[in-house]
Image (cartoon, rainbow, N blue to C red):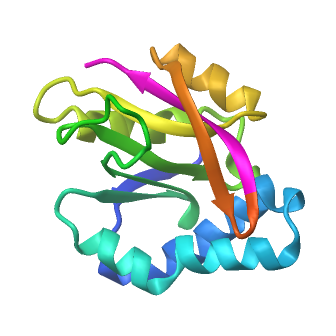
Amino acid sequence: MQDVIIRRAVAGDLETLAQLGRTTFSETFGHLYPPQDLEVFLHAAYGADYLRAALADPDRAAWLMEQNGVAVGHALAGPCDLPHPEVGPRSVELKRLYLRRTAQAQGLGARLFETVLAWLDRDGPQDVWLGVWSDNHGAQRFYRRYGFVPVGEYGFAVGQTIDREFIFRRLG
């Protein structure tokens, strides 16, 4: 088995997180968007300002997954800000979970996801929310295996492109 480490990201990981985030999102979804829309999204979602704030916020956490010393996955979680009427002040959200293509289909996504869920449930079971692209059927199957069910949908902006995103929830 290859050496795999999952660890909490720290401020010194900002550039690694930014680059890995841009790469994994582009590998997964980049083909769906006009280049300008993709660049606007990547700058906002993986820019230094956003990531610096996320890493400094005690209510949010980010993780890096390293395989043989190379960053191949990342995740981000914290308070839920999905647009659903049942989201409350104690609702938590998996905001991101991505792996490089080369690290997929090895069970690594499950390991990273379970690490995030353990952190989210650290004070007892929580209602956990997440958003998933409506046409990402593999991710939807994955989340269903962990007890998540669809409870709504919304428009997810990538630049000027608006995707249909499903809101999934797992009751604590």
Q: Is residue 65 left or right of residue 35?
A: left
Of the pair 154 and 118, the residue shown nearer to us: 154
Residue 12: horizontal and vertical position, in percent? Answer: 35, 83
The residue at 16%/35% (across/down) is 122
Seen in the picture, residue 54 relative to 83 is either above or below; the reply is below
Going 47% across and 37% down the picture, which residue do you hit?
Answer: 130
Residue located 58% across and 33% down the image: 153
Task: Tell me if residue 136 is in the magenta stretch.
Answer: no
- What is the magenta segment's predominant secondary structure? strand
25 over 115 or under it: above or below: below
Q: Position of residue 43 (x, y in %)?
A: 61, 80
Is residue 38 at least partly visible in the picture? Answer: yes
Front-most of residues 125 and 41: 41
What is the span of residues highlighted in magenta in the rendered image? Answer: 162-172
**Please, which residue is most extreme toward the front here?**
85
Instruction: Residue 103: give x, y in percent of width and height.
Output: 68, 48
**Can residue 13 be seen in this snapshot?**
no
Q: Report which quarter residue 92 is drawn in.
A: top left
Please tell me which residue is depicted at 23% across the width and 74% down the height of the picture: 56
Q: Was residue 169 drawn as part of the magenta stretch in this picture?
A: yes
Q: Is residue 93 left or right of residue 155?
A: left
Q: Is residue 52 left or right of residue 108?
A: left
- Please identify the quadrant where the N terminus is shown: top right
Measuring from the top left, give residue 18's x and y in whole percent.
54, 76
